[in-house]
Image: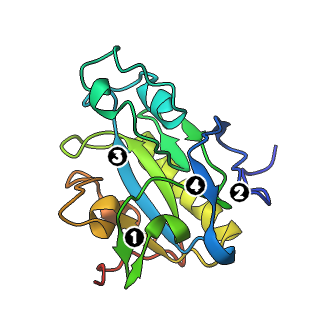
Amino acid sequence: MGAAAVDAEGWFSGARRIPSPNCDDRPGGEVPSLLVVHNISLPPGEFGGEGVVELFTNRLDPGAHPYYATIGELRVSAHFFIRRDGELLQFVPCGRRAWHAGVSSWSGRERCNDFSIGVELEGTDDRPYTEAQYARLIDLARALRAAYPTLAGVAGHSDIAPGRKTDPGPRFDWARLDGAVPGLKREAPKP
């Protein structure tokens, strides 16, 4: 079996595919140039359940947990979700725009969803991420960089939405990505 790769639509062969309706076309032939790292856990601080899958596919039961009632109407997604054990799920093909960044800007450009790929790590701001997650993220970033040579920047959600978002949080070890993916670089966000 060959190495995992990204097909022409942007589906990654190394991921379990769970299509989300929460996406649309990228505007004006836009191609990915930024990788955005997030964290998520549903219910907050709990790992391993189906809450994230249900949220990204509009099947979250607002009565299943008190927190779900506050987010049940959201229509959000990400391209990828990496569980604590390294399992990789894909919700949106990279050729389409996932709804992960919200109000955001990077290097003077607004609307980061237009030109980014969103990767959610199962986690919280205050807990370390797992070795399996870092390994999977690096493998994924390498494959994405090979498929999209325009993908040159990497940022946290907190970098593109400062003051509004804090993820992936201070426990994310950015040094793990430094130099691990040739051509992909984290730079200080520019207003």
Q: Which residue is denoted by mark 2 in the rendering?
A: 10
Please tell me whether mark 3 sits on a helix, a strand or a loop. Answer: strand
Amino acid of disc 1:
Asp
Q: Position of residue 161 (x, y in %)?
A: 28, 65
Q: Nearer the viewer, mark 4 or mark 2?
A: 2
Q: Which residue is denoted by mark 3 in the rendering?
A: 39
Amino acid of disc 4:
Leu
Q: Is residue 26 visible?
A: yes
Please state which of residues 61 and 124 is positioned toward the viewer in this rendering: 61
Q: For this view, does 152 lie left or right of residue 168?
A: right
Q: Residue furthest front?
A: 73
Q: Position of residue 31 (x, y in %)?
A: 63, 73
**Counting other residues with Cα less than 10 Å from the Cα at mark 2, is it few (<14), some (14-19), or many (20 or more)?**
some
Q: Which residue is denoted by mark 1 in the rendering?
A: 178
- Above or below: residue 65 compared with residue 47: above
First-in-chain label (4 vs 2): 2
Q: Are marks 4 and 2 in contact (CB under 8 Å)?
A: no
Mark number for residue 140?
4
Quadrant assignment for the C terminus: bottom left
Q: Nearer the viewer, mark 1 or mark 4?
A: 4
Quadrant of residue 91 within the rendered picture: top right
Q: Are marks 4 and 3 in contact (CB under 8 Å)?
A: no
